[in-house]
Amino acid sequence: MYNLKLDLERIELICEECGHVELVPYHCHKPMKIMDDKLVCWKGDHAACCDSSSMRELPLHHGKKMILKN
Ligand SMILES: [Zn+2]
Ligand SMILES: [Zn+2]
C-alpha cells in the first residue's frame, strides 16, 4: 500500500560522479540530517541509543562525499 507520509521521508543522497542514489540512513526512526559534511541524528548528536552512532561521515562514492539529491 502506498504510504505518502513515509514517502516524504525518503531523502536521498546522490553521487555527483555517476548519479548513484542511496537513501539517507535513519536514526531514531527518522532520516538523519546533514550538518558540516556529516550525517547527524535529527535529534542532534546524542549518546548511542542503538548500535549505530548518532553522528557519522557521509558515505563516499567514487572517492567523493555524496550530496543531497535535489
Ligand atoms: Zn559514484
Ligand atoms: Zn538518534
Image: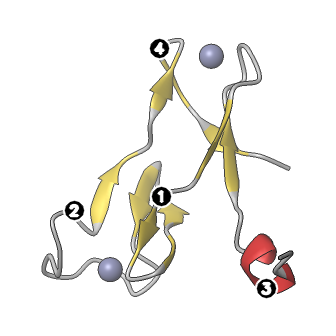
Residue type beneath disc 1: Pro
Q: Give the mark, 2 or 3, whose residue is nearer the N terminus.
A: 3
Answer whether labels 1 and 2 touch (C-beta < 8 Å): yes
Residue type beneath disc 4: Gly
Q: Quick one: label 4, few (<14), some, or many (20+) residues within 10 Å?
A: few
Q: Secondary structure at mark 2?
A: loop
Tell me which image quadrant ligand 1 sits in: top right
Q: Please tell me whether residue 24 is drawn above or below residue 5 in the rendered image.
A: above
- The residue under label 1 is 25
> Label 1 vs label 3: CA separation?
17 Å
Numbered tag placed on residue 52 in the rendering: 2
Q: Please tell me whether residue 22 is drawn above or below residue 20 in the rendered image.
A: below
Q: Quick one: label 2, few (<14), some, or many (20+) residues within 10 Å?
A: few
> Label 4 vs label 1: CA separation?
19 Å
The mark closer to the camera, 4 or 3, is: 3
> Label 1 vs label 2: CA separation?
10 Å
Please give left or right for residue 62 compared with residue 13 in the image: left
